[in-house]
Image (cartoon, rainbow, N blue to C red):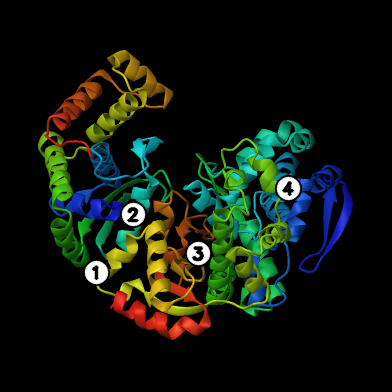
Amino acid sequence: MFKMQKFFRDPIYGFIGLTEKEVELLDIPAVQRLRRIKQLGNTHLVYPSAFHTRFEHILGVLHIATRMAKKLNLNDEDIEIIRYAALLHDIGHGPMSHNFETILETVNNNKITHEAVTLKIIESDSHIKQILGDKTKDVLSLLSEANQTVNQEIISGNIDADRLDYLRRDSYHTGVAYGNFDLERILFTINKKDDGERSYLTILEKGMDALEHFRLARYLMHTQVYYHHVRAISDNMLHRAVEVAIRDNTLDEKNLKFDDENFIDNYLSLDDSRLFQKILANPQSNSCNLIRDLENRNLLKRGFEIELKGINPLEKRKILNMKPKDFRKLESDIAEKCDCDKDFIIAHLQKIDNALYKSSYDFFKAAKTPILIETDNGDLHELEEKSPIYAKQEPQHKFFIFCPEKYKLKINEFAKNLIP
Amino acid sequence: MDISDAILTTVKAAGGEIIGRTAIQKLIYFESIFGLVEANYKPHFYGPYSSDVSEGIQELTELDFLKEEIETSKTTGFLVPNDWRRYRYELDSDGDEVVSIINKDSKDEYDKIFKIVELCVKTVTIDVRILSWAAKVNLIRSNQGKPMTKDEIKSTAESFGWKITEPQFDNAIQLLKELEHCEISNG
């Protein structure tokens, strides 16, 4: 039984209760910082009310994870660990949320996920470890990707508390109604099935329609919100602004090196606003102009756009083999040809994927368990065996060149010659 | 050579198809030690592993350069991560067209990759186990940067969680010796 010390009002669930230790965790600066990181980064430039933050999301995940754990009859100790993990699962997000993962990847020449940063923050924060006490190891294990238990599936799985919260929360705050689904039915029909060797998180067959609705909601939120082309443009402008700021010595690249001894301190000193302010402090740099343009929604436009599937194999190969330096070279060539500043030309290859419409085979390839349906007699089946809905599963690869509006026509002509 | 070009050339050199993603990983690894491709290999359960190569295979499949088929054996009635699986990769028509261009554009590297793959076919019939043992032994030796005894190599292997038996070690050394003598200079 959990004794709640504080209750937080939440627009999605009403009230969310936290225990004394959880309130202590919530008060740590690394967690409070999430109040200053927008959940959806630049999405407010498409949907003006999308200003919700990672902070309310972690509270929502704690709430849903607890309901899932209780439905699965987990013991109090497991629930306690799951609630800590839910509260801490996003503390590794950088300014503008997922945008900063791309920036870290560029700087470190290696994928650095927010999950990896989360683990590093917990491991290095003595205050967090003091509050978690002997549960620290279990929380870290639950947040580690290698873990494949039902408890971990609640935090990070096909139907996890993270997705169950963010879809409805993002839907509420963007006003895009497609993201809403029948949460209660899903929570009512999740189950835990043991086959002797390990346990699986399943959905009872009677919950399949709710599950299909959830999958469709996720798909539509991807098309309408997460992969909206204006968001792709504004995200790329932000990445370019940081890249130019590093080049022009406005930002110190060393501070963003994952292996640097001061990485965590520097990282935690940044949030959405502080990152923007640092870049705006150097008005001589184009990075400042890019951030000003973002603030004023004076966005670059799509000068050129093509889907890779449709082009001839040799051009497709050319684009596929392009490395960051090749993108920069292409941008310079275009800029020179069009008499435009190269900092405002952005070539971008986008892969549009929707994990929930992946086949069981795709989950298998990624060493993950597929979505499992449990029939009345207790048998387990892959969802696609039972689902009447078929969806195209191959991801789309799109190549874009973004540019200022006045160069659109010129760039389109030039790019057409480049990629017939 | 770019990683995706190296993957396509490797599949072509193996006769147009390769069974096993691990086999592709290890063949590209041997190509990387001759400086033919840069793929950022790191120690992994099955030996040196490159996420760049893994992503390359995925992209080539999604973009119709490679055809991918999978055979599986389910232990539970549905696929779980530990189930047995075997991947088969074959050049698709787009892949075939691109390989002929790679041959023209990068003839020297193309020929060297062919030599390495053909040697692995001839010596060990692309037996993925032997490729893995040889790749593990090579990674350990190259990390050390100085000659090592058999026992030193085996004990370092254990520190990576790899157990290499005596016959496996001999098979690995035999393949590495063949590779060292296949007249492919570094660079």
Report if residue A391 is visible in the image. Answer: no
Which residue is identified by label 3?
A356
> What kind of element bears circle 3?
helix
In three-dimensional space, the C-alpha distance between marks 3 and 2, rounded to whole angstroms, equals 22 Å
Along the viewing direction, whichever of B37 and B9 lies nearer the viewer: B37
- Residue A264 point in image, percent of width and height: 66, 42
Residue annotated with mark 4: A83
Q: Which residue is mark 2?
A: B56
Drawn side of residue A122 relative to residue A219, left or right = right
Distance between mark 4 and mark 1 Cα atoms: 50 Å
Q: What kind of element bears circle 2?
A: helix
Report the amino acid beneath label 3: Leu
Circles 3 and 2 in contact, beta carbons < 8 Å: no
Does label 2 lie on the same chain as label 1?
A: no
* Cα gap from disc 2 to disc 4, whole angstroms: 38 Å
For image coordinates 47% across by 52% down, the residue present is: A369
Question: Residue B179 appears at what percent x and percent y?
Answer: 16, 32
Compare marks 4 and 3 and give the one earlier in the sequence: 4
Q: Residues within 10 Å of mark 1 (few under 14, many from 20)?
A: many
